[in-house]
Image (tube, rainbow, N blue to C red):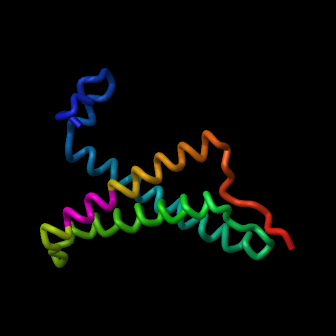
């Protein structure tokens, strides 16, 4: 973020350190993955009692899932046995950033509109 002058903002100097940025990204990505797994398990248990995702909840879940899966594929590239082509890395990078950005903007819009993730299904 140093090239975008974000690191010049008081308190944001740490964003200029690439290695620290990668470590923070992996840390929060793994926390987000753990939270997603937790909520999938909770949702599966509550689904039996009649809880279902709303349309906006489903869209957010799909976008978040795509961002998480593409992030996992991005992280796999550090393994010695994984050697993706340059074109594949560019595609994964833009796909990951795009799905994360779409999720962010859609989630902010849903928050502003007070859209719920789930509703009780009618019987």
Which residue is outermost to the top? 10
- Total labels: the figure holds 0
- Image quadrant for the C terminus? bottom right
Name the quadrant containing residue 61: bottom right
Image location (x, y in percent) of residue 94: 27, 58
Q: Residue at x 27, y 45 (%)?
A: 21
- Image quadrant for the N terminus? top left
Residue sitting nearer the eye, 5 or 121: 121
Q: Is residue 101 magenta?
A: no
Determine the main secondary structure of the stretch shown in magenta: helix
Q: Residue at x 70, y 60 (%)?
A: 118
Q: Residue at x 19, y 76 (%)?
A: 82
Image location (x, y in percent) of residue 111: 61, 43
Along the horizontal axis of the image, is 29 left or right of 57? left
Magenta-tinted stretch:
89-96
Residue sitting nearer the eye, 90 or 36: 90
Q: Residue at x 27, y 70 (%)?
A: 76
Image location (x, y in percent) of residue 67: 40, 61
Name the quadrant containing residue 52: bottom right
Which residue is outermost to the bottom? 81
Along the horizontal axis of the image, is 87 left or right of 44? left
- Residue 104 vs 94, above or below: the answer is above
Along the horizontal axis of the image, is 4 left or right of 67? left
Which residue is outermost to the right? 123
Image location (x, y in percent) of residue 90: 19, 62
- Residue 97 vs 40, above or below: the answer is above
């Amino acid at each position: 973020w140093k090239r975008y002058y974000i690191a010049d903002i008081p308190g944001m100097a740490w964003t200029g350190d690439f290695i620290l940025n990668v470590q923070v990204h992996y840390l929060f990505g793994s926390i987000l993955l753990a939270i997603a797994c937790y909520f999938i398990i909770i949702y599966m248990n509550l689904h039996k009692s009649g809880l279902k995702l709303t349309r906006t909840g489903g869209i957010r879940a799909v976008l978040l899932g795509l961002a998480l899966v593409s992030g996992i594929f991005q992280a796999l590239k550090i393994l010695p046995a994984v050697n993706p082509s340059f074109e594949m890395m560019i595609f994964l990078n833009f796909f990951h950033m795009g799905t994360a950005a779409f999720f962010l903007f859609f989630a902010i819009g849903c928050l502003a509109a007070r859209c719920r993730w789930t509703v009780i299904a009618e019987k």
